[in-house]
Amino acid sequence: MAIPASGKTVLFESIEQYYNEKHEGKTKLFIVSSDQVSLQLMNEHIAANPNASKEDAYQGTRKKYRTRYDNEIRAVCQKAQACEQQFIVIIFDKNHPENALKGPLDIVKDYFQQFTSIGLIPKTGKPLGNNLFSITYLVSCVQRAIKRENHETLVGNKEKVASVVLFFFTFFNKVQIDKLPFNKVFYVPFTNEDVQMDQVLREEALECLKIIQRERFPEDIQNNCKEALQKFIGICEKYNLGFPDKNLQREIVWKEIETVDK
């Protein structure tokens, strides 16, 4: 459960390394990637419409996404059923706001009578208002998103990319962890949380965020909050918040997985 540009890929590489080292071939790991499903749909759209841009392809395939993603989960579950390994781990590489959790788990139930569901949730500092996450986490993710190039699906100019991340952030308002459909939750550090920096970001960004959060969709944020959005992007570019130490993240995640193993 996270927003875009959190650093999920790095985390999943760490989990894959754990099973390769600790289980020595006893585990089969599968990853269902939301981005790869979207990219496949976009490539199909561009093949049929050679003049279409990546952004056009993304918009033109959004209605097909849910069915394709669910079918990918079913295909992976079928492969998992046929495995000879003692342990099976399926990672759902997706941002997963609360309303997106039930569908994948219901599909898994169709194939497996017993399984453990684990939620991977960013470990952040003081929540921003009624959101699950901190302002440091939000700024870090926007900062990473507007800097990175050649992402599979998060395409467009800074304003568009930032508005998408801000849009996803609102999905984590009023989330109650104890009511989520998980057997266990891992809290994973994706950001460098600092109390003083958090306060600085609140003082500088809170007013423009209040304006931005009046809007519901990325397009509305871009069209109706241009000044506030530009100011927020400027704040995100002003500070170099960086990534947490990969070894620390790995140590925390591996310790959590060992608890489940036992």
Image (cartoon, rainbow, N blue to C red):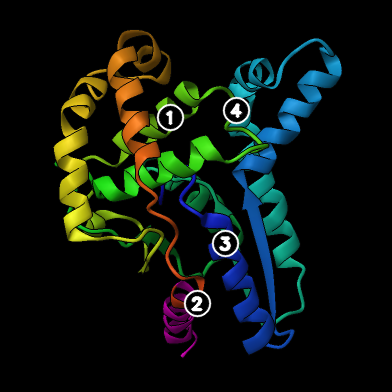
Mark sitting earlier along the chain (4/1):
4
Q: Report the residue marked by disc 3.
A: 10
Q: Which mark is residue 162?
A: 1
* Image-based side of 207 in relation to 180, left or right: left
Q: Report the residue marked by disc 4.
A: 155
Mark sitting earlier along the chain (3/4):
3
**Gap in Å between the C-alphas at discs 3 and 2?**
11 Å
Q: Position of residue 256 (x, y in %)?
A: 42, 79
Find numbered disc 2 in the image and state the secondary structure of the residue it sits on.
Answer: helix
**Gap in Å between the C-alphas at discs 2 and 1?**
29 Å
The residue shown at (58%, 57%) is: 9
- In the image, the segment drawn in magenta is 249-262
The amino acid pointed to by label 2 is Asn
Outermost front residue: 238
Find numbered disc 1 in the image and state the secondary structure of the residue it sits on.
Answer: helix
The amino acid pointed to by label 3 is Val
Q: Is residue 63 above or below residue 254?
A: above
The amino acid pointed to by label 4 is Val
The residue shown at (43%, 41%) is: 143
Residue 3, visible in the rendered structure: no
Q: Which mark is residue 247?
A: 2
Q: Is residue 261 magenta?
A: yes
Q: Which mark is residue 239?
A: none
Report which quarter residue 34 is drawn in. Answer: top right
